[in-house]
Amino acid sequence: MKKAILAIAGLTLAAAIAEAILRVRVHLDMWRLAALFESMALLLGIFVAFTYTDFIHALRKWTHASLILAILMPFALLFPYFILAFGTGTFSYLALAKLTAYIAVPTLLLLPNRIYYAEGASWRDFAAMLSLGLPVSAGWLQGIWVWPEDIYIFRPIFCVCVGAYAFLVVRNLKDAGFKLLPKKGDLTEGSINFIAFFILAIPLGLALQFIHPHMRSVSVPGFAADYLGVYLTVAIPEEFLFRGILQNLLVKTFKSPHHGKYGLIVASVIFGLSHFHHAPVPNWRYAIMATVAGVFYGNAWRVRKRTSSSAFTHAMVDTVWHFWF
């Protein structure tokens, strides 16, 4: 719990320093800039805090002791929005309603698991996962964090925080492996699956006419910046949902001796199908490629039981695809 509090405080302090530096270099409204930085710092701090086991255990203890606390605590996630919305004059009742509903639905769905929970998945688990993923893919959370423009990064970070509370705290889901910083083993396993995927994906992608190789000059800092953005806003959120929650629950649900492989395959197919909505709709080529990629992402998670491993593979695939395919 102490590390989690320090993470939130540290990011808040870093935001204040960054604001001061930017204020000297760029002439922007001081209060709006402060609201933006502090809102982001608080949300990132909570995001990081959920990677600490003692933080999860503390919240779990409180939810177990009080139904009222279990229901009310996740709405603390609205504070970053209030800071930005009131600080920049962009508050919207519609935006507040969307965020409130997004928090309430998965939390209430999983409340029956607050004290007595099953290892295997139930309809409530799948409904809660759908309530986390569908609003994002459908674009229902756009137009909420809108100063100085509609800022994308708030959405996936917020979604992970809601999902972490609902599944890790309320449902007490074990073995999700929600981690941000990769260890040496994560990088090794992630690299192996990245290489194995590309050996298969290049000929398959060419046959499907999904990829179009091209030469593009890119600097190391440019690649690293793109990779970091993808890692935090795409790979970690998707790996947490599809591997840390979905694959994890499926493995626990299947009773076959090969439950690990069945869980991996089913989660990968669902991951692939979630890409059908990309243009041109229905995008079956994207769905096939995403299913194959999901097998390798899922394998990295299966071996390491850490989202930082599968997210490394995921972010590498997306970044290389962005620059050269």
Image (tube, grey):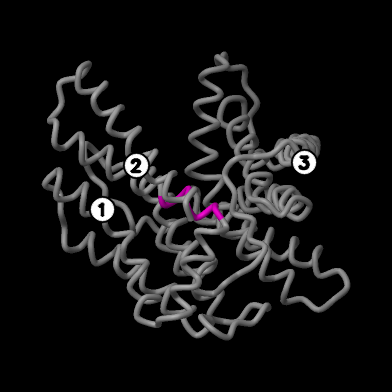
**Nearer to the camera, 204 or 124:** 124
Residue found farthest to the front: 2
Q: Secondary structure at mark 3?
A: helix
Q: Amino acid at mark 3?
A: Glu
Marks 2 and 1 sit apart, C-alpha to C-alpha, by 12 Å
Instruction: Using residue 90 as the reference point, say whether residue 222 is left or right of it.
Output: right
In terms of sequence position, does the residue under pointer 1 or pointer 3 come before the other?
A: 1
Residue marked by disc 2:
41
| Residue 120, quarter of picture | bottom right
Q: Is residue 126 left or right of residue 205?
A: left
Instruction: Measure the alpha-carbon separation of dots 1 and 3.
Output: 37 Å
Mark seen at residue 189: 3
* Residue most extreme to the right: 257
Three-letter amino acid code of the residue under disc 2: Ala
> Which residue is label 1 attached to?
81
Q: Which residues are magenta?
A: 46-52
Secondary structure of the residue carrying numbered label 1: helix
User: What amino acid is labelled 1 in the image?
Assistant: Tyr
Q: Which of the marked residues, 2 or 1, is nearer the chain's N terminus?
A: 2
User: Which is more N-terminal, label 2 or label 3?
Assistant: 2
Q: Relative to 237, is 110 above or below?
A: below
Which label lies toward us, 3 or 2? 2
Q: In the image, what residue occupies the spot 52% across and 38% down?
A: 230
Magenta-drawn stretch contains 133: no
Q: Nearer the viewer, residue 252 or 131?
A: 252
Please report the residue visible at 70 percent of the width from the left and 39 percent of the height from the top.
205
Disc sitting over residue 219 in the figure: none
In percent of the image, x 69 and y 42: which residue is there? 208
